[in-house]
Amino acid sequence: MKQVYEVDVWITNTGDLRPEMLTENDFSGWVPSSRRVDFSDMGWTKLGPARVELELDLNGLNQRQVEALQAEKRNVMAEAEVKLNRIEEKIQRLLCLPLEVS
């Protein structure tokens, strides 16, 4: 699935922007933004409009989301198991304490 966006491109004056970066494929100091956003009050310089094309691979998207949720579930269960073990340890220690009766 291909999506095309028209955006403005801004650069910061605090970045490490070199003139040759404007002609190379190094976009690390550039920030695309909505056309409604103005960063000039924050020290940014507007380079101008840009056309951004995104090619999204949506095949298997649901499967990847399911796999991510399953991984998150495993992590949550592991964290819960650790917490349950700590609680059980505390219970067992309390049960092992000698009870003083007067």
Image: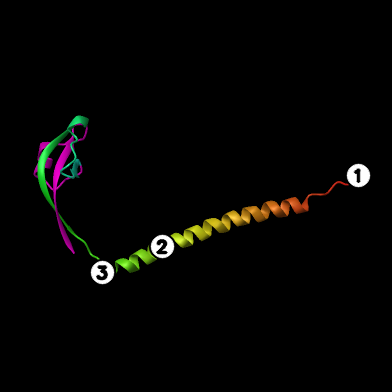
* Residue in the foreground of this view, choosing between 77 and 24: 77
Q: Does the CB distance between marks 3 and 2 fall below 8 Å?
A: no
- The answer to whether residue 16 is magenta is yes
The residue under label 2 is: 69
The local secondary structure at tag 1 comes to loop
Mark 1 lies on residue: 102
Q: Could you tell me if residue 42 is visible in this image? A: yes
**In the picture, residue 12 is in which quadrant?**
top left
Which secondary structure, mark 2? helix
| Residue at x 16% of width, y 39% of height | 10
**Which residues fall within the magenta stretch?**
1-28
Q: Is residue 66 magenta?
A: no
Query: Closer to the N terminus: mark 1 or mark 2?
Result: 2
Which percent across, then down, holds residue 14?
22, 32
Q: Amino acid at mark 3?
A: Asn
Q: Quadrant of residue 48?
A: top left
Report the amino acid beneath label 2: Leu
Specify the label residue 59 is tagged with: 3
Q: CA gap, disc 1 to disc 3?
A: 73 Å
Q: Amino acid at mark 1?
A: Ser
